[in-house]
Amino acid sequence: MTHADGDLPQLHPADGPWSVYLHVPFCASRCGYCDFNTYVLSAMGEDAVSGYLEAAHRELELARQMLGERPPVSTVFFGGGTPTMLTPEQLGELVDHLRTLWGIDDDAEITTEANPETLDEDVLSGLLDAGINRLSMGMQSSDESVLAVLDRRHRPGRAVEMARLARKVGFDDVSLDLIFGVPGEDLDSWRRSLDAALSAEPDHVSAYSLIVEDGTRLAARIRRGELPMTDEDDLADKYLIAEKTLVEAGYINYEVSNWARPRGDRDHRCRHNMGYWLGYDWWGIGPGAHSHVNGTRWWNVKHPATYRSRLADGRLPVEDYEVLNKEQRHEETVLLQLRLADGLPMSQLTQLERHRAERVVTQGLGMIESNRLVLNLSGRMVADRIITNLLV
């Protein structure tokens, strides 16, 4: 579909928590496996950062006009790209602007992603001063050869060092992201990466299987035969190793690819991502950012220059939007909530889908608890297939 530039239908925000995502599109270099909307900062011109910030603040103002009064923001997430290519003060100004427009919950989760090479003690302290209380670092692996295949710039061990330093300066919510199934990574290498991550005692660990995206340098290398393609059996073996290692270390799997440590009456699960999976509202700020408000979904133009130009003209930088119908919203609910350890309410399923859910149980892939379909470990490993079979 194509709509007029900057147009959105009238929005009807849902009740309940809501979030703001801020996409910072800059990186020091582009990783060979990445297909995110990112740009090498050194190639973007001297005013790239100042132009981005001016436009992002303008988009926040326009969002306020569109949404009107809302409860305070529940979670904020700086993603990218590498948000810590910006200074802590610049990130803090965006947080302050949000606080001015709507307010931010007293116990809000405010996360920034970070490349370990962009961090040091002063930067980490500055992030805390800016109001950021959760740090999510891309570690990927502790194996130098694996990092080289991924074109990651940070040296092995840097993420662990920065996680420990973050704890020292006062962060009480630190997450590490790992990737498994990289060409050339054997089982022992993956075990060492998990052990290295755990040595930093992070509060949260994400472990994703490598997806080879078309158009990336990694895909080209595999196509030319320089590297082997990922192997499904290898991915399954490594997922089982991750589950065993993390659970034995006291982590709880709360979504297929995410584990969190318990803390008091609330564990360290990423509340921002939980908002996505539970279908809450969020507004995405920045080039290429996606948003969702009560069944209306839209996405911004991708290039930072176009993004800036639209906002300089006083227009929302929307490239296109869609209004999800009842069937599409149902499919999204099943797709996202069945990946959660809390499972999917059976009340969300049609009568036919409930019969299919019972087959999931008889196949030994899950159980029905408190009238919710919950996948077990075997089910989690084939979650996509189960979801497809439920919805056909």
Image (cartoon, helix red, strand yellow):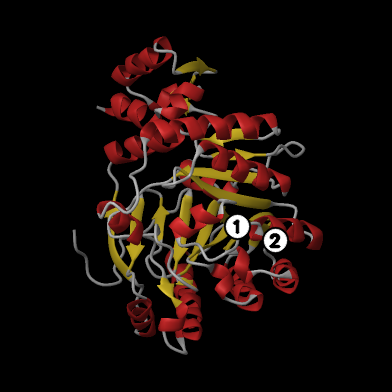
Q: Which residue is mark 1?
A: 137
Q: Residues within 10 Å of mark 2 (few under 14, many from 20)?
A: many
**Residue 301, above or below 236:** below
Q: Which mark is residue 162?
A: 2
Say which residue appears at 58% left-offset and 54% top-offset.
139
Q: Is residue 14 visible?
A: yes
**Residue 215, above or below 343:** below
Q: Is residue 332 left or right of residue 141?
A: left
x and y percentages locating residue 18 in the rendered image: 53, 53
x and y percentages locating residue 130 in the rendered image: 69, 70
Image marks 2 and 1: residues in contact by CB distance under 8 Å: yes
SS at mark 2? Answer: helix
x and y percentages locating residue 116 in the rendered image: 62, 64
x and y percentages locating residue 201 in the rendered image: 73, 46
Amino acid type indicated by mark 1: Met
* Residue toward you, 168 or 361: 168
* Residue toward you, 106 or 388: 388
Name the quarter where the C terminus is drawn: top left
Amino acid type indicated by mark 2: Met
Say which residue appears at 59% left-offset and 70% top-offset.
84
Q: Which mark is residue 74?
A: none
Q: Residue placed farthest to the left in the image?
A: 1
Q: Quadrant of residue 355?
A: top left
Name the quarter where the N terminus is drawn: bottom left
Q: Is residue 204 left or right of residue 147?
A: right
**Residue 350, above or below 204:** above
Mark 2 and mark 1: Cα distance apart in space? 9 Å
Say which residue appears at 51% left-offset and 57% top-offset.
147
Q: How many labels were placed on the picture? A: 2
**Residue 385, above or below 264:** above
